[in-house]
């Protein structure tokens, strides 16, 4: 896939939106992206080499093990950060990699000389939150090759299928398998697609693995991005609207779950109970409980109103990729890398039943009395929600089935595979309706 980033030279030094001949550099717009791209890997919260961190402005100005002031905030002080960026190779940072360019150093020098001020909301906010939300370059007109389909979703009418693409969501006519529209200005990879209860807003969990992630809110009718929330240093993996409310829960690869008020786009709760990626979320039908599946091999249950942790199910022997709450609100079903479907009680976190799938499972979907499970053997398993027994299987993918969704009218099931293939089946008889490669 061609790079979508570029540097532009217009008769003077320009990097990003900063021009050396114009205003001093700003931390959020100019300095923070350099720190994220070149410094964060070695000086973040998990790996603070030399006791020094750059993951927020608050941490950036705190001296590391050398006790030297990183940023000169008073006249006459020297800036250890600037010295380490410009000194000889024995002490220079970044270590064991290419030095910053003269243009990047000029940006940091300009910012420090102007006072090293913070222009964001809170000094403790991470770089991902401080950096202004990106307006992404247009996706390629034609893909050089198919990409893995990690998210699919039926349109509210059920006549179109939304498919996660590269910096976009592609919308396809199901009957003809023709591309009818494209929704751009999204993160590099799309991991989650879900509609608001009123069917007007599409929530898109997206990001660039290991670098940045966010939840973008899209007006489906126009395709315009109306809000950006849950900005993090890694990808957003799932989102779920709380029933009968304007709240949205968001899960990300930083191990956090956040609940947002969509009227104000403000964060209501942040839950840090998981030790690894949070792969999937599901609300109970009454909105009283939220469950989360994680790569840490657990599924956790939270109070939907307060965000408090209630119970934790630890019966899986591998990463948990999918979870749903049954209609009675008393039990949950989860599945993942251990190739088993677990049904367990929300109150006691005790297993009630287990079904051997014989294949690794990904994010699952409950629709009425059915549960659909995409599997790494290329199938989508149809499970009866009432007794957690196999009710059928949709076969045909030649690669891992990574994502699935059920038609809101209860007539069709769709899935996306690692090789870029999309399939739609008739739910009544399990026969294929349409198959295509989602490659514009």
Image (cartoon, grey):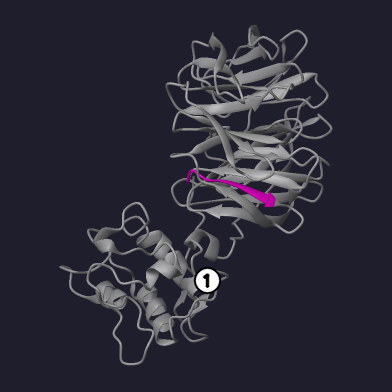
Say which quadrant the C terminus sits in.
top right
On the image, the x and y values in percent for residue 185 come to 64, 53
Given the current orientation, which residue lies at the most extreme left position?
A: 90
Left or right: 315 in relation to 367: left
> Which quadrant of the structure image shows residue 35?
bottom left
On the image, the x and y values in percent for residue 70 come to 32, 75
Is residue 102 visible to us here?
A: yes
Task: Say which residue appears at 43% left-offset and 48% top-offset.
Answer: 210
Magenta highlight range: 254-260
> Which quadrant of the structure image shows residue 411?
top right
On the image, the x and y values in percent for residue 180 come to 76, 38
Q: Nearer the viewer, residue 158 or 421?
A: 158
Give above or below for 137 relative to 375: below
Give above or below for 173 relative to 2: above
Label count reads 1
Left or right: 146 in relation to 38: right
Give above or below for 92 relative to 295: below
Q: Nearer the viewer, residue 262 or 6?
A: 262
Task: Say which residue appears at 28% left-offset and 72% top-offset.
Answer: 85
State yes or no: residue 174 in magenta: no
Is residue 378 visible to us here?
A: no
Task: Say which residue appears at 57% left-offset and 65% top-offset.
Answer: 132
Q: Residues within 10 Å of mark 1 (few under 14, many from 20)?
A: some
On the image, the x and y values in percent for residue 51 come to 27, 62
State yes or no: residue 258 in magenta: yes
Callout 1: SS? helix
> Which quadrant of the structure image shows residue 307?
top right
Given the current orientation, which residue lies at the most extreme bottom position?
A: 75
Residue under label 1, please give it.
29
Q: Nearer the viewer, residue 383 or 183?
A: 383
Q: Nearer the viewer, residue 63 or 329?
A: 329
Task: Say which residue appears at 23% left-offset and 67% top-offset.
Answer: 65
């Amino acid at each position: 896939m061609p790079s979508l980033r570029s540097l532009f030279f217009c008769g003077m030094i320009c990097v990003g939106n900063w021009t050396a001949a114009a205003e001093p550099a700003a931390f959020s717009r100019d300095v923070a992206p350099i720190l994220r791209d070149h410094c964060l890997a070695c000086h973040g919260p998990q790996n603070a080499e030399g006791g020094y961190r750059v993951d927020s402005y608050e941490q950036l100005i705190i001296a590391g093990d050398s006790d030297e002031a990183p940023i000169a905030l008073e006249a006459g002080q020297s800036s250890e950060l600037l010295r380490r960026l410009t000194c000889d190779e024995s002490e220079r940072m970044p270590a064991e990699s290419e030095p910053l360019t003269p243009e990047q150093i000029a940006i940091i020098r300009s910012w420090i000389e102007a006072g090293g001020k913070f222009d964001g909301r809170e000094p403790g906010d991470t770089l991902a939150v401080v950096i202004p939300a990106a307006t992404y370059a247009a996706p390629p007109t034609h893909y050089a090759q198919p990409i893995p389909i990690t998210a699919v979703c039926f349109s509210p009418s059920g006549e179109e299928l939304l498919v996660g693409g590269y910096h976009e969501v592609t919308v396809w006519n199901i009957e003809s398998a023709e591309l009818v529209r494209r929704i751009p200005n999204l993160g590099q990879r799309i991991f989650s697609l879900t509609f608001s209860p009123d069917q007007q807003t599409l929530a898109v969990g997206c990001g660039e693995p290991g670098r940045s992630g966010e939840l973008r809110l899209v007006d489906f009718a126009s395709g315009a991005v109306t809000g950006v929330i849950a900005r993090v240093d890694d990808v957003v993996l799932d989102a779920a609207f709380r029933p009968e409310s304007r709240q949205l829960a968001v899960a990300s690869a930083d191990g956090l779950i956040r609940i947002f008020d969509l009227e104000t786009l403000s964060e209501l709760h942040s839950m840090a109970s998981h030790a690894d990626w949070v792969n999937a979320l599901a609300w109970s039908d009454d909105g009283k409980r939220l469950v989360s599946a994680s790569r840490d091999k657990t599924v956790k249950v939270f109070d939907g109103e307060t965000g408090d942790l209630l119970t934790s199910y630890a019966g899986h022997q591998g990463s948990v990729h999918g979870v749903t709450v049954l209609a009675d609100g008393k039990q949950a079903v989860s599945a993942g890398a251990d190739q088993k479907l677990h049904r367990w009680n929300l109150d006691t976190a005790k297993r009630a039943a287990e079904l051997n799938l014989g294949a690794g499972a990904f994010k699952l979907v409950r629709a009425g009395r059915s549960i659909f499970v995409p599997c790494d053997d290329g199938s989508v398993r149809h499970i009866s929600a009432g007794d957690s027994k196999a009710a059928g299987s949709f076969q045909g993918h030649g690669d891992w089935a990574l994502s699935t969704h059920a038609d809101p009218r209860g007539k069709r099931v769709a899935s996306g595979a690692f090789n870029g293939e999309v399939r739609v089946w008739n739910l009544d008889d399990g026969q294929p309706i349409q198959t295509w490669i989602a490659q514009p």
